[in-house]
Image (spheres, rainbow, N blue to C red):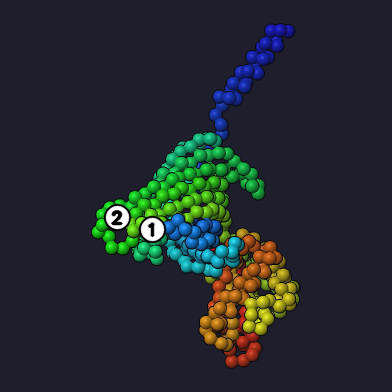
């Protein structure tokens, strides 16, 4: 019996030793590209800005990327993308973003994550993150790879090409998490920046201010969908400090987060279903159309208090019904655009249309249709009439707000 007991104990020890020595599950991380696929990345940044060590302002920056894989060539793919950047410095958090400046971009990216992009493109800002090793990676394993930040300094320093700042990033694969039925792999990314600009070696000869030294750090937590071969979302905290030739300092401290989704383009059957929804809900002065930006619901003769952007209760009831339709497209961003009839000055019309678009967008956020950073607003004044402004009926139609379920 004693021998049996020792034998069993020895077996257990051997099994434990084998489990200890057995290699942990390893993953090979790769981007997977399919020609024709479209995706959207939406990131929001909350940052404090300092000038010469004095607090300047708080800013919220929203970056929206709509991209399409137009060609797959071996291990690389060509992406054609539009980057939209908008910034609010009002000091209020969760401000509804106004649609901002658009930047076209074309770039190649290989399966490991390395970019190939021409100097004329300012976007994306952070390039070559993440970059994966060409081998299997185990939980707890780390690796390093070179990356770059491309800063747009045209306005602040009149530099007409992207200001490229290199860095070396350290990656660590820390494990997995289950989210919405998917297994996501968590990868921590850290890099420090210290870059002396070679363009300013002879400072004495310079007559205009330029960045001399760029310093800072970034810490990102990436959530990677390895089955799909794409990033799901990430969080970041960062600090960037730029010292100029003339001794000025610009500092940016903040956090960022981003999510990546595939575009959902409504099918013909879905369009018919939404049209039927509008009819079943008895929504007067509401029409539907498909255009280049997506599926647009136009609310004509929308009622506000006179010469204001305060919605009447009757219109809130209408928007509550429309909200049920919008909830059918949870992954699509919304664009709310305001339009006026031809009355007053062009400046007053533009301002009123912007305010009314914002009022509708804020109410949709209040209803829980979307988070604030997932809705954008535009005002067009009387620039895009749908009827002549020579009759009261025509003016009523032109006083409208349009909500676009974006698919680009």
Q: Quadrant of the C terminus?
A: bottom right
Crowdedness near tag 2: few (<14), some (14–19) or many (≥20) residues, C-alpha within 10 Å: some
The image shows residue 313, relative to residue 174, as above or below, that is below
The image shows residue 317, relative to residue 164, as above or below, that is below
* Residue 200, numbered circle: 2
* Residue 336, numbered circle: none
Q: Quadrant of residue 185?
A: top right
Crowdedness near tag 1: few (<14), some (14–19) or many (≥20) residues, C-alpha within 10 Å: some
Nearest the viewer among 239 and 185 is 239
Decide if residue 71 is in sight here: no
Nearest the viewer among 222 and 266 is 222
Residue that mark 1 sits on = 248
- Which numbered disc flags the more N-terminal residue, 2 or 1? 2
Q: Quadrant of residue 343?
A: bottom right
Residue that protrudes farthest toward the bottom in the picture:
390
Q: Position of residue 181 (x, y in %)?
A: 65, 47
User: In front: mark 2 or mark 1?
Assistant: 1
Decide if residue 89 is in sight here: yes
Residues at marks 2 and 1, CA–CA distance in whole angstroms:
14 Å
């Amino acid at each position: 019996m004693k021998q049996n007991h020792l034998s069993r104990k020895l077996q257990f020890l051997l099994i434990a030793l084998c489990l200890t020595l057995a290699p942990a599950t390893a993953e090979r991380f790769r981007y997977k590209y399919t020609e024709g696929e479209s995706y959207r990345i939406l990131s929001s940044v909350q940052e404090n800005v300092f000038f010469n060590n004095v607090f300047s302002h708080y800013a919220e920056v929203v970056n929206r990327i709509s991209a399409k894989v137009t060609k797959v060539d071996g291990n690389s793919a060509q992406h054609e993308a539009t980057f939209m950047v908008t910034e609010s410095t009002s000091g209020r958090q969760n401000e509804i973003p106004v649609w901002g400046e658009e930047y076209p971009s074309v770039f190649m990216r290989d399966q490991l994550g390395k970019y190939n992009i021409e100097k004329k493109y300012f976007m994306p800002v952070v390039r070559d993150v993440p970059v994966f090793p060409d081998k299997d990676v185990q939980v707890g394993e780390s690796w390093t790879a070179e990356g770059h930040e491309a800063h747009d300094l045209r306005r602040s320093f009149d530099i007409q090409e992207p200001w490229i700042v290199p860095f070396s990033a350290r990656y660590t694969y820390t494990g997995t998490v289950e989210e919405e039925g998917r297994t996501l792999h968590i990868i921590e990314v850290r890099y420090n920046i210290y870059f002396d600009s070679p363009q300013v070696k002879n400072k004495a000869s310079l007559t205009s201010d330029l960045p001399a030294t760029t310093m800072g750090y970034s810490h990102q937590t990436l959530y990677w969908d390895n089955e799909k071969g794409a990033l799901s979302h990430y969080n970041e905290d960062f600090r960037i400090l730029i010292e100029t030739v003339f001794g000025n300092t610009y500092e940016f401290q903040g956090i960022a987060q981003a999510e990546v989704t595939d575009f959902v383009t409504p099918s013909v059957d879905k369009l018919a279903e939404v049209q039927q929804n509008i009819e079943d809900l008895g929504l007067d002065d509401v029409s539907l159309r498909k255009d280049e930006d997506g599926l647009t619901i136009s609310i004509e003769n929308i009622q506000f208090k006179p010469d204001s952007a305060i919605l009447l209760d009757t219109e809130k009831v209408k928007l509550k019904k429309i909200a049920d339709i919008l909830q059918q497209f949870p992954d699509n961003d919304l664009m709310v655009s305001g339009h006026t009839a031809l009355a007053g000055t062009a400046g007053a019309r533009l301002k009123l249309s912007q305010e009314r678009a914002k009022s509708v967008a804020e109410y949709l956020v209040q209803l829980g249709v979307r988070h604030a950073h997932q809705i954008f607003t535009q005002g067009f004044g009387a620039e895009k009439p749908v009827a002549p402004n020579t009759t009261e009926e025509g003016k009523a139609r032109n006083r409208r707000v349009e909500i676009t379920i974006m698919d680009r």
